Image (tube, rainbow, N blue to C red):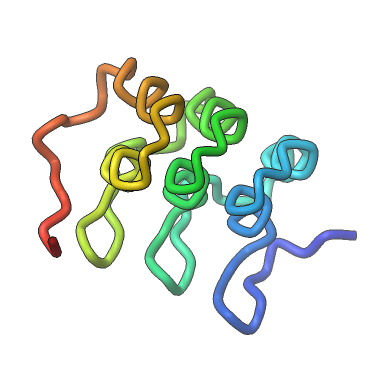
Amino acid sequence: MISAKKNSMGNTPLAWASRNEHEGVVKPLLGRGDIGPDKAGDDCQTPLLPAASGGHEGVVKILLGRGDVDPDKTERYCQTAASCSSENGHEGAMKILRGRDDINPDNSDLSG
């Protein structure tokens, strides 16, 4: 059984699956009632941010397909999923995010 609890680094199974492009793990985790798909880990990142940052388009689509994931949420350094995907040159993830009406294109990374 997969636990919804954070590991010693403060990451949930959903965060790790999103970061590592494991769509086959993301889908069943999102079906659980005890998983917060928009909940930030100790690093202040929701699962969408590392998925977009890594260019994991399938995971980005899965997460954005839910009504309870805020695609414009910022992490501790004021980065958003869109700013991270753009910064890392992931055009596909950026295109998916840009297609959303609830993304503020002026929401920028204030750290750099």
Instruction: Return the x and y of residue 90 as percentages of the image width and height.
Output: 42, 35
Judged left or right of residue 90, residue 59 is right
Judged left or right of residue 90, residue 104 is left
Image position of 8 with respect to 43: above or below: below
Camera-nearest residue between 46 and 55: 55
Judged left or right of residue 101, residue 46 is right
Q: Residue at position x 48%, y 66% from top? A: 41
The quadrant of the image that shows the C terminus is: bottom left
Q: Residue at position x 25%, y 53% from top? A: 79
Instruction: Return the x and y of residue 25 as percentages of the image width and height.
Output: 77, 44
* Res 94 quadrant in image: top left
Judged left or right of residue 91, residue 17 is right
* Res 32 quadrant in image: top right
* Res 75 quadrant in image: bottom left
Q: Which residue is outermost to the front?
A: 89
The quadrant of the image that shows the N terminus is: bottom right
Q: Which residue is outermost to the right?
A: 1
Instruction: Return the x and y of residue 27 as percentages of the image width and height.
Output: 73, 35
Q: Residue at position x 50%, y 47% from top? A: 54
Badge count: 0
Image position of 39 with respect to 90: above or below: below
Q: Residue at position x 53%, y 23% from top? A: 65
